[in-house]
Amino acid sequence: MRIVYFSVDRDEDKWLPGLRAALPGADVSLWEPGSAAADYAIVWKPPQQLLNEQTRLKAIFNTGAGVDALMKLNLPDGVPLIRLDDAGMAVQMAEYVCHALIRHFREFDAYEADTRAGKWSYRKPLSRADFPVGIMGLGVLGARVARAVAQFDFPVNGWSQSVKALPGVQCFAGRTQLSDFLAASRVLVCLLPLTADTQGILNHAHLSHLQSGGYVINVARGAHLVDADLLALIDSGHLSGATLDVFRTEPLPAEHLFWTHPKITVTPHTSARTLRSESIAQIAGKLVALARGDVVAGVVDRAHGY
């Protein structure tokens, strides 16, 4: 079995030893232009040249949950594209979202400003019933976040492209129920895959449906958000702020208004990092199962883009 690895991050010195240890019977090597034909490719944001040259692939494994970069390429027909299910990212995402949510709900930013000014302040406690949390995207990550948020007794709504049912979550599905979902939510968490249908979905029209004083947490992809629309709705008072971990251009340009806006918290795409050891174990397990002819989880539906 021959496997090629490529990552735009040029981190093969970290991945190749782990892959070789997890797949001792395989020939695992770094892909370079002109590399010998392989049975499987393990990649992160590969060039089109890799796919053009590797004409004998039986499957392509993506080293992340999001496959939007691969969906922009000309993928070989009939070759399964397989993404990570979780590999330690779901719990990180739940931590991040709950931190951002609770920081906003408990008004810790305001307390922090007061303490910096030497002011001992008191704020009337808010009611969780007045802060329903809407989660866009109910896949592996979204479902984990929904469970975590519910543990803090916030009402939880969920929206997905197809019908889902999750305990303790009021579920909405499809474009026909999107406005109702947004109107039922005050805090909006975006965990959608990036596809042609979801690009720019966090726009003025949709965000205007959120309850007054709404708050946005985007941990999916920067292209989901129309930056100017978010700024306009915060400055108008309809939205109270946002926590943003992903951006259309990364790193976020130094001149971008998000850096200095007093009601926006910026983090450097760190809500859920790929955990290498867990990812290698999952990819190796799926690769061996696939070679046996077994069905594996995480096969991407190319028609939907996730």
Image: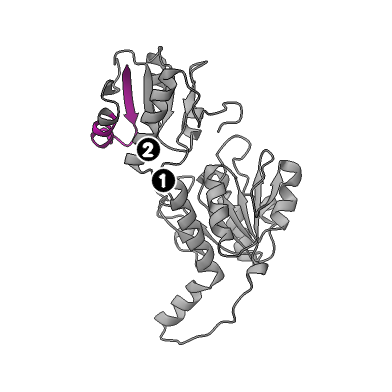
Label 2 close to label 1 by CB (< 8 Å): yes
Residue receiving disc 1: 88
**Magenta span includes 193:** no
Q: Which quadrant of the view contains residue 229?
A: bottom right
**Magenta residues, as a range?**
1-19
Where residue 224 sits: x, y (%)? Answer: 57, 45
User: Does residue 263 show up?
Assistant: no
Q: Which quadrant of the view contains residue 240?
A: bottom right
Which amino acid, mark 2? Ser
In this view, the residue in front, 269 or 291, is: 291
Residue receiving disc 2: 279
| Spatial CA span between label 2 and label 1 | 8 Å
Quarter in which the C terminus is drawn: top right
In this view, the residue in front, 233 or 174, is: 174
Quarter in which the N terminus is drawn: top left
Closer to the chain start, of discs 2 and 1, is 1
